[in-house]
Amino acid sequence: MYKKAFLFIVAAIVIFFLASLLSQQRSLARPFSGINPTLAKPLRALADKELQSALSQQVAKNARWQALINQKKMAVGLVDMRDPSRIKFAHINGNRMMYAASLPKIAILLAAMDAMEKGELEETEEVLHDLRIMISKSDNYASTRMIDRLGYKKIESVLTDPRYKLYDRNYGGGLWVGKRYAKQGARNPDPMLGLSHAATAAQVCRFYYLMAMKELVSPQRSEQMMKIMEGPELHHKFVNTLDRIAPEARLFRKSGSWRTYHSDSVMVWGPERRYILVALIEDPEGESICRQLVFSVEEALKKVTPFR
């Protein structure tokens, strides 16, 4: 009898272990691993009225947020990727370019990948280390070293490249890096508003979308960028909330803060949740707003398609 009970317990433990391992493997599946990137549609063509309505209604429930939106001091972008065959895009003030502090460091990452792919920048351990801490820790020294290696003109040429158009005058501008993350150094401000570190919510959504679809530089470089962006070491804003409500999700993320300017961006990939979220906020309480915004966005997603 005791032997049977012991065997039953052992079997239960093995089954639990195998189930946990299977669950982990599923959660570690590469984003869009089964999707043909050549079939990807432009993100702007995926604007969805239902998602737009749900997002606008949820945000409007907070009077303070709505006031910031009306003042053009808050922008939100959202991409629902739960169904790869029907990706949905919505945004509020998405083409409004704002100062974004450290968030545009993703543009430095892209320019570096492009330069390494073309043989313009040597792919050394030092460079790869700087790219990693530039993203995961938002290290300003590493960011400045990368800017100096690349040069403003290289970064600008990649952002305005017809392949990406991540800075596009026809859509309010977008991602821009025109100043070292240091007190000294020349500036190369964006030609529309004269900002040094800028972004629009829509263009940051496009960055993540193109990366997920393996369309930034090359499929291999896109995957390399995702590896660098995964596992943020700063657990504030979006990540503070996601750590609590989706601890098993994979997070690809870059944020930024300076004085009253707060920005965050994340691609959430895990059980039930598969979405891109971007927020740009000019308000002293921006960090807290980002934490709360995750709940509102998830409610909007549930109205469109309930989580399984």
Image (tube, helix red, strand yellow):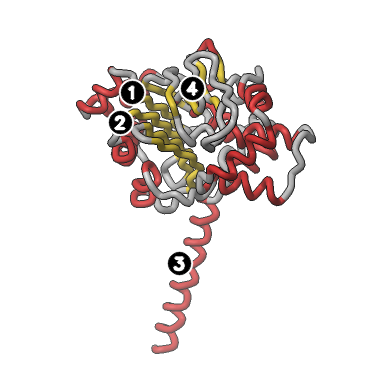
Frontmost of labels 4 and 2 is: 4
Q: Residue at x 59, y 47 (%)?
A: 132
Q: CA distance from mark 4 to mark 1?
A: 15 Å
User: Label 2 is placed on what type of residue?
Assistant: Asp
Q: CA distance from mark 2 to mark 3?
A: 47 Å
Circle 3 residue: 16
Q: Residue at x 67, y 24 (%)?
A: 153
Name the secondary structure under disc 3: helix
Name the secondary structure under disc 4: loop
Circle 2 residue: 283
Residue 195 badge: 4
Q: Residue at x 42, y 18 (%)?
A: 96
List x then y, in percent, for residue 73.
33, 23
Circle 1 residue: 73
Q: Quadrant of the N terminus?
A: bottom left
User: Label 4 is placed on what type of residue?
Assistant: Leu
Q: CA distance from mark 3 to mark 4?
A: 54 Å
Is 308 on the left or on the right of 64, as rendered? right
Q: Residues within 10 Å of mark 2 (few under 14, many from 20)?
A: some
Q: Upstream in the sequence, badge 4 or badge 2?
A: 4
Vertical relation: 163 (above or below) 105: above
Tell whether label 2 touches label 1 (CB within 8 Å).
yes
Tell whether label 3 touches label 2 (CB within 8 Å).
no
